[in-house]
Amino acid sequence: MARIELKFQYTQSEYVRAERQYLIAAKILHKYDPVLAVLCLLIAMIYMLASAFSTLNVILFGIVILVVIMGCCLYFLMPILKYKNTSKFHEVYTLIFSEDVIYFKTDSIDSELQWAVYSQLWQNDNFYYLIQGVRMYTLIPKRVFKDSDEQQAFEELVQSKLKLIKRI
């Protein structure tokens, strides 16, 4: 089987979109969380107003506000900060996939990985996620493949090496 060489650099918008999609796919955040947050805020506000601002209600409202802020930070702010503050995301990546190993090269990384490092491949319309563990993955934008034949060869190679392929 031929080796597949991919060379690319992430853009901020691409990385942020991929990280947000991962948060939903990995069930760290759920699609219904914003609705649930608004509902909890409304219930807490109504209960607080109906019971004349008791200490317990103010504390409950504060906790709900804190959870909403944390969720917003995790979804909106953290992917942007992660991209901006991690120098490796600004480097040019060269990934070479062969039957035996994966060569991973950037300005700061030069390593040879065994396929066993990865346990799963997740994919959506724009990205492949080679999953190592929780919140640990190698992101491959689909735009970096030369053509559909190269992309198909990559998928076949990965299917022969990993146990779980998941469409997200």
Image (cartoon, rainbow, N blue to C red):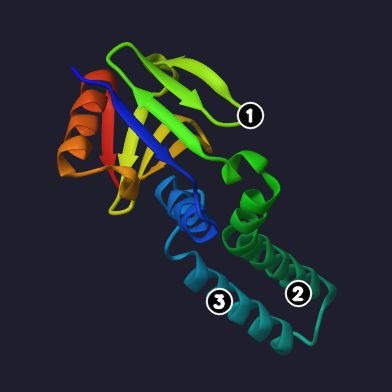
Disc 3 or 1, which lies upstream in sequence?
3
* Residue 114 vertical position relative to residue 149 in the rendered view, above or below: above
> Percent x, y for residue 124?
30, 50
Q: CA distance from mark 3 to mark 1?
A: 43 Å
Which residue position is annotated with label 3?
38
Amino acid type of disc 3?
Answer: Val
What mark, if any, has residue 143 been given in the picture? none
Closest to the observer, 88 or 48: 88
Please name which of the two marks, 3 or 1, marks the residue nearer to the observer: 1
Q: Residue at x 66, y 77 (%)?
A: 44
> Percent x, y for residue 153?
18, 30
Determine whether, in the image, residue 36 is placed left or right of residue 115: right
Please name which of the two marks, 2 or 1, marks the residue nearer to the observer: 1
Locate residue 24: give its quadrant. bottom left
> Percent x, y for residue 32?
43, 65
Amino acid type of disc 2?
Answer: Asn
> Percent x, y for residue 7?
41, 37
Q: Residue furthest top?
A: 100
Which residue position is annotated with label 1?
108
What mark, if any, has residue 57 been given in the picture? 2
Amino acid type of disc 1?
Answer: Ser
Determine whether, in the image, residue 142 is placed left or right of residue 24: left
